[in-house]
Image (cartoon, grey):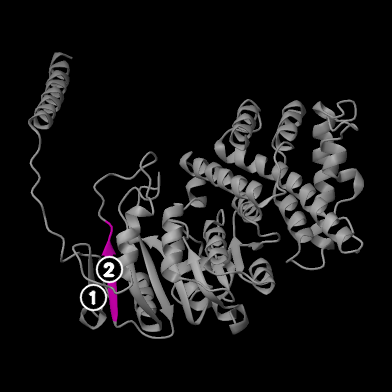
Amino acid sequence: MFEQTFKNIDDILHKDSGCGSELDYVEQTSWVLFLKYLDDFEKDRQIAAELSGKEYNIIIAPEYQWSVWAIPKLDDGKIDHHAAVTGDDLKDFVDHKLFPYLKKFKTEALSPDTIEYKIGEIFSEIKNKIQSGYNLREVIELIDTLKFRTHADKHEMSHLYESKIKNMGNAGRNGGEYYTPRALIKTIIKIVAPKIGETIYDGAVGSAGFLCEAFEYLKESKSLTSNDIATLQKNTFYGKEKKSMAYIIGIMNMILHGIEAPNIIHTNTLSENLADIQEKDRYNVILANPPFGGKERAEVQQNFPIKTGETASLFLQHFVKILKAGGKAGIVIKNTFLSNTDNASIAIRKQLLESCNLHTVLDLPGGTFTGAGVKTVVLFFNKGEATQKTWFYQLNLARNLGKTNPLSENDLAEFVALQKTCADSENSWSVDIAGIDQSTFDLSAKNPNKKEEATLREPKEIYAEIQQLDQQSAEILKSIMELLND
């Protein structure tokens, strides 16, 4: 039922003049979904307070509650269409009354780790793009059919929301920045193996996939006490995100996974001067996939001891600095980082190898990130001791990865098994860091164990290529003749 509801919402937004892409569909669905979630959240809190004999102070004023402006109902539970505003009246209420009211929560909240602050921050960063109040009315009524009251409901909703984020990434533009394949995230978390009580950080949080999956991993890691639950809710997961849409989606994704007031800050992580990071600012675990190929301005580069315009290289410096001594990290980065010959890349590799134990490098095939068109590696390191030896694993698959053939956890099962002992195989090998070029610290992933297999082409494949070359020759000859005749 939930899946069909989301599809129906997308169909409505598709015909609205204010929403032009999958990115808009996810963004606009998110704020309406958040307000419905908030309504169910308040109901649950109110019931819990009554059962314990306590008084509950409502968060949202009566006239701005979902059950008043969005879905007023009759005594029989059906929508009161006479009381439910629609068309221009609804759009005017949402744009000029509801959103301004919700924005105020940011300045009035007691602290940033409250649901009140998140409400204010979300509605300070987002705007209603749905141009037709009639379309908005349809979306609201469909969202109202979704329930957040049980664990099963939230679990299903979180999976569907993840699917929408994935579709948004596949839609192109900058959507891919928000989606890292979940099979890869789960594998990285297995290797890093965080524990309850450790703080987990992602400074390029996107849709919060790393934090959500780390939450799921820790929930299953042991039988949770009430203290464990409180720790996971309030003192475990931290993130920063620069882009408004990703920030909203990340918060919504964490909420749907069961984290009530996510500790995500809307800021440019790279605007923070590394010299200002103190011990209190550091984290036990870092899980991240910083943006590929971004370029930063000179004033941002001034925050880093090693100057470079490459966004991912600046993020790597940030992660090394903000990781606690003894802390663990799993970072996705372009594979060119291992061998780039510019001074900044060499200096960053040297710093990483000297201040951290880069114990594992996972070399991923092209197509891992749908639409990104880049090859990547995952760097696994612990901070506090220099690297002596690095174990490499090259993921070689018998198929091409893509939208219809995504990476699976099964694809990475051998990597997870071999990594436990850093064993050599056809796909894995170790490198003594003392033996690499100490002037470049080149870490190129060159597999010495991979057997080269001569592949013979099928006759039909050769024939098809001959036909294609004949056609190209004929076209070139035709062009020459036309030039001679002019």
Q: Nearer the viewer, residue 340 or 281?
A: 281
Q: Nearer the viewer, residue 84 or 217?
A: 217
Residue 277: image quadrant is bottom right
Q: Which residue of the protein is positioned furthest toward the top in this rendering? A: 485
Residue 400 x/y as whole percent: 28, 44
The local crowd at label 2, few if under 14, some if 14 to 19, many if 20 or more residues have their Cα within 10 Å, is: many
Tag on residue 392? 2
Q: Secondary structure at mark 1?
A: strand
Q: Amino acid at mark 1?
A: Val
- Mainly helix, strand or loop, the magenta region? strand
Give the residue at x 57% y 41%: 23
The Cα atoms of the two marked residues, 1 and 2, are separated by 8 Å
Residue 340: image quadrant is bottom left
Work out whether mark 1 precedes mark 2 in sequence or the reverse, and give the earlier one.
2
Magenta stretch contains residue 14:
no
Q: Amino acid at mark 2?
A: Phe
Whether residue 456 appears in this view of the structure is yes
Whether residue 313 appears in this view of the structure is no
Q: Nearer the viewer, residue 370 or 34?
A: 34
Give the residue at x 50% y 70%: 286
Residue 254 x/y as whole percent: 62, 56
Classify residue 71 as left or right of residue 451.
right
Answer whether labels 1 and 2 touch (C-beta < 8 Å). Answer: yes
Which range of residues does the magenta coloring cover?
389-395
The local crowd at label 1, few if under 14, some if 14 to 19, many if 20 or more residues have their Cα within 10 Å, is: some
Quadrant containing the C terminus is top left
Q: Is residue 36 above or below residue 130?
A: below
Residue 390: image quadrant is bottom left
